[in-house]
Image: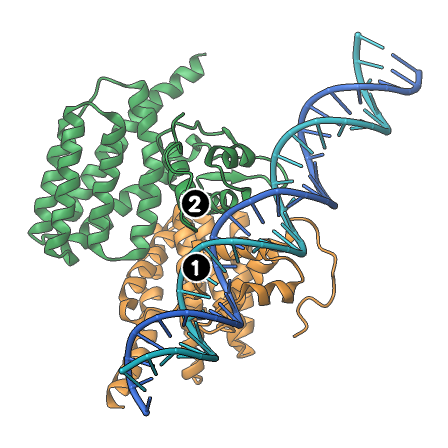
Chain colours: A orange, B green, C blue, D cyan
DNA sequence: TGTATTTTTCTTGTCGACAAATAAAATGCA
DNA sequence: TGCATTTTATTTGTCGACAAGAAAAATACA
C-alpha cells in the first residue's frame, strides 16, 4: 500500500515508465493474477496522475502481450495459455541455444562481468530460498547472455519468453515448494565457462540441455496437475 | 493527397488502427524515408482527429521499432542499421527455417489454400513487374507459412523481420531495377510442395536455401554500395 | 415467475487546452 | 564580427471533461 507515498513530484515523462515498470513486475511476479481486470481510473488515483500516461503504459504492455484489451470493454492481465505451452517451450529452447551460442561467439570481456554478477545474485537467492529473486535474476542472467550475443532480434524475443517464463516458474514454485535445484547453478557456471572459452558448439549443447532440463521439470509438474484435473 | 476525403465519420476506436495501418505501410514501402520526422499535429490535421489517438498509434509503432521517440523532442522513422545487417540476416535465415519446418509439421489443409493464394499473387505481381506488390505479397506468403506453423512466438518475430525486410528489399529494387527472379517463384512452389508432403527436413532445407539466396543477393548489392562509399 | 425491453451506471475513447521542455531566434556584449 | 545570454516559438506530455458503447439494473409484460 505504500507505493507512491514518497514523491508527489515527478519529472515530466517519467510517469509512463514508472507505471509501465511497476505494472510489468507485478504481472510477472504474479502479484496480479492472470485474468485480473485492470482499471485505468484506479491506477490513475493510485499514481496520482491522469489517465493519459496510464493509458500509454497500458498500450505498451499490450504491445508485449502482457495485457489484453477488449475494445470498448475491459482490459485485463493476459492469461497463461496452458493448452499451447509446447509452443512456448519450443521457442524457449531454441532461443536458449541461439543466444548462448552467439554469446560464445561474440561476447566481450565486460559482458562476462555482468553475466557473472547475475550468476552470483542467483546463487545467493537460491541459498536464501527467495523464489521471487531467484526467478528474476535467472531471467536477468540469461538476458545478459543474450545481450552478449549482440543480436537485438533474438534478444527481443528471448526477453519476452523469459518474461512469460517468470510467470510460469512463479506458478511452479508456488505449488512445488520443496525443490531448490543447486544443479541449475552448476549448469549456469558451465555455460559461463563455455562462453568464455568461445566454445560455440559446447555453449549450444549446454544451453539446450539447460533449457530442456527446466522444461522437463515444469512439464512434469503440469502433467501431474493435468491428471489431477481429470481426476476431479 | 486524397487520403481521408471520403468518410469524415469514423467509428469509435477505429481511428487508431487506421493511422497505425496506414503509417506502417508508408514506412515499410519507404514512402516515408527512414529518419524522417513525424509530426503529431500534422497527422492530427490530416486525419481530422485529435492528437490522442495519433499518439497511441505512434506508441504502438515505437513498440515494434518502426519509429523512434526522443523524449520531449522529435519522433522519427527508424533508420536502417546497415552496420548490423548481419544480425538481421542471421535472425531472418533462422526464422525462415523454423517457420517452414513447423509449417510442414503442423499445417492444416486450409492453411495451404491461403499460402497458395499469396503464392499466386506474388507470381502475378512479378509478371506485372510491380515491386511494391511483389514485396508485400512475398512477406505475406512467408507470414502465412509461419501462421501454419502455429507458434505465435516465432510468428511474431518473423513478422517483424519480414517487415524490416520489406524496407530493405524496397531499397534493393530501387537501386537494382533489372533483376526479377523467376527463381524465387519456383522456390516458393517447392516449399509449398515440401510443406504439403509434411517433409520436415526438406522444408527446413528449402527454407534455409531460399533465405540464403535472398540474403546473398541483397548482400551482393550492399557490398557493392559499400565499396562505392569508400571510393567517394 | 420468467423473459424482453428500457433505463441507468460504468468504463473507455476522444477532445481541446495548458504547461514543461527543448530548439530557434533575438539580443547584448566583447 | 563572434560568442554568450536572454527571449520567443514550437513541440511534447499531461490534464480534466465529455460522449459513445457496453454491461448491469430496473422495469414492463406475458
Q: Is residue B156 left or right of residue C16?
A: left
Q: Residue at the location (18% across, 29% down)? A: B125
Q: Residue at the location (22% across, 25% down)? A: B130
Instruction: Decide if residue A36 is in sight here.
Output: yes
Q: Is residue A138 left or right of residue A219?
A: right
Does A33 sit above or below residue B207?
Answer: below
Count of residue discs: 2
**Badge 2: chain ID:** B
**Both labels 1 and 2 in a single chain:** no
Does A230 sit above or below residue A214?
Answer: below
Q: In which quadrant of the rendered view does residue A95 lie?
A: bottom left
The location of residue B12, given as percent across then percent down, is 43, 51
**Badge 1: chain ID:** A
Which residue position is annotated with label 2? B15
Which residue position is annotated with label 1? A72
Q: Nearer the viewer, residue B62 or A153?
A: B62
Amino acid at each position: 500500500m505504500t507505493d507512491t507515498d514518497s514523491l508527489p513530484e515527478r519529472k515530466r515523462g517519467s510517469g509512463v515508465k514508472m507505471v509501465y515498470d511497476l505494472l510489468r513486475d507485478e504481472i510477472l511476479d504474479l502479484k496480479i493474477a492472470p485474468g485480473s481486470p485492470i482499471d485505468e481510473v484506479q491506477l490513475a488515483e493510485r499514481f496520482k496522475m491522469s489517465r493519459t500516461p496510464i493509458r500509454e503504459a497500458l498500450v505498451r504492455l499490450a504491445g508485449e502481450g502482457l495485457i489484453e484489451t477488449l475494445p470498448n470493454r475491459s482490459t485485463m492481465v493476459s492469461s497463461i495459455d496452458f493448452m499451447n505451452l509446447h509452443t512456448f517451450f519450443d521457442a524457449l529452447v531454441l532461443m536458449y541455444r541461439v543466444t548462448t551460442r552467439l554469446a560464445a561467439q561474440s561476447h566481450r570481456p565486460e559482458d562476462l562481468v555482468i553475466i557473472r554478477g547475475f550468476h552470483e545474485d542467483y546463487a545467493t537467492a537460491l541459498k536464501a530460498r527467495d523464489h521471487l529473486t531467484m526467478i528474476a535474476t535467472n531471467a536477468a542472467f540469461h538476458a545478459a547472455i543474450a545481450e552478449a550475443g549482440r543480436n537485438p532480434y533474438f534478444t527481443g524475443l528471448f526477453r519476452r519468453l523469459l518474461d512469460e517464463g517468470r510467470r510460469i516458474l512463479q506458478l511452479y514454485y508456488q505449488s512445488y515448494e520443496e525443490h531448490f535445484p543447486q544443479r541449475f547453478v552448476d549448469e549456469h557456471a558451465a555455460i559461463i565457462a563455455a562462453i568464455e572459452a568461445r566454445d560455440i558448439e559446447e555453449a549450444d549443447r549446454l544451453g539446450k540441455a539447460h533449457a530442456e532440463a527446466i522444461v522437463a521439470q515444469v512439464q512434469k509438474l503440469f502433467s501431474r496437475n493435468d491428471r489431477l484435473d481429470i481426476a476431479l
